[in-house]
Image: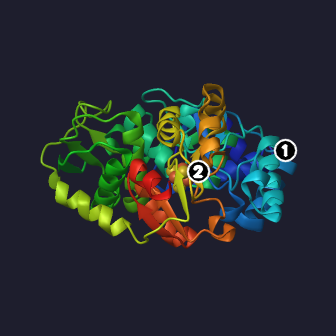
Amino acid sequence: MYLTKEEERILNGESGEVMQRMFRLLVRLGDIYNADKMIPVGSVQVAGVSYKSIGDPGTEFLEDLANKGAAVQVLTFLNPAGMDLEDWETIGFPKEFAKNQLRIMKAFKDMGIVITSTCTPYLAGNLPRFREHIAWSESSAVSFSNSVIGARTNREGGPSALAAAICGRTANYGLHLWEKRQPTIKIDVNAALELNADFGALGWLVGKQVKNKIPYFTGIKNANTDHLKALGAAMAASGAVALYHVEGLTPEADLVDTKGIESLSVTQKDIKEAYATLNTGKTPDVVILGCPHASLREIATLADMVEGKSLKKPVWICTSRMMKEAADRMGFTKIIEKAGGHIVADTCMVVSPIEQMGMKTTGVNSGKAANYLPGFCKQEVVFANIQDLIDKVS
Ligand code: F3S
């Protein structure tokens, strides 16, 4: 791989031990994937933030980096943490867990990282532009930025994203290259899709079938950004899909080449079967919405649905701190809390320790959450659209 003189100096340790270690990691990745050079990145999003995911070894690794003076060079946001960083006590997160989570946040803050903790950074102040090279790691955020915004990122691991943030660069390979962004399978959708859960079911189903490919959807007549984030998140979860195109809706769909690629069709019956497969439980102990983190529109929808109701089971909607503040101002928080629900910021149902908090069956409207909850959180899942979930617990 070609390295500039400055990059060679970093690799030789002239910019300090931390930079050398981090840059070496990027160069290794570049060598493995045959990158021709390093490219600057406009922003970074780092995963591996929850104490539940990284434990003591990860916490100590981050504290060591921060103590050695590691500092990020570009705008860097974080993935969800394991708890609401402000209201953790009221919501009932365990004290010991909270203590460790706060150590992690301090280490990130000391490195100059914006301690936002969200998987929808594009809704919270980190919005890349079309064709901008970035290094993001959370799979749904990677999918959204590649597909809906047309920015360019591989699905980084936590350490490689951190290295890109500290070095301000990443290796030029994979989805940074136009030729690697071409669709490899066409998905013809012959089904009516209306709600986030429908898009989540479609994404989960397609992800399972296409695994790592780049789908090109036809037949999706309309979808807002909430629908597209639900679709991409589910495909990323079940099939590691990091980029998809939707005819007439996503920015690169008119530019890519679909000639001669294989195709697959999805019917209403397939969507119905996906709903059935994702349902492993019957009565939810808790309903948790906001996977990926909810937009203000999704919070408003929930507020509208629960206004004047009395919820019999806890209902959370997970979101970023920024959306929560907007919801506070709009009065949505009060409405949801009056009904017995919570807007939970900075965390989500998968990375928080819900299994330690007595929850066994979780109701979700997200294909991604439904995919991960059984394995990561030992949960049975009730997968349904938001109205049906609220009806079940009202
Ligand atoms: Fe975000 Fe957690 Fe879902 S990180 S995409 S809300 S599993």
- The residue lying at 79 percent from left, 42 percent from top is 109
User: How far apart are labels 2 and 1 at the CA level?
Assistant: 38 Å
Q: Circle 2 sits in a helix, a strand or a loop, which is it? A: strand
Mark on residue 257?
none
Q: Quadrant of residue 54?
A: bottom right
- Mark 1 residue crowding within 10 angstroms, few (<14) / some (14–19) / many (20+): some
Residue topped by disc 2: 316
| Residue ID at (65%, 26%) | 329
| Residue 79 visible, this angle | no
Q: How many badges with numbers are in the image?
A: 2
- In this rendering, does residue 321 appear at all? yes
Relative placement, left or right, of 220 versus 284 is left
Vertically, is 297 above or below 241?
above
Going 59% across and 45% down the picture, which residue do you hit? 339
Residue 243 rendering spot, x and y as whole percentages: 37, 45
Q: Residue at x 51, y 72 (%)?
A: 375
Kindly identify the amino acid type of the residue bearing the numbered disc 2: Trp
Q: Which circle marks residue 69 in the picture?
A: 1
240, 257: nearer the viewer = 240
The kind of residue tagged 1 is: Gly
Q: Position of residue 253 (x, y in %)?
A: 26, 34
Task: Give 85 or 136, whichever is nearer the viewer.
Answer: 85
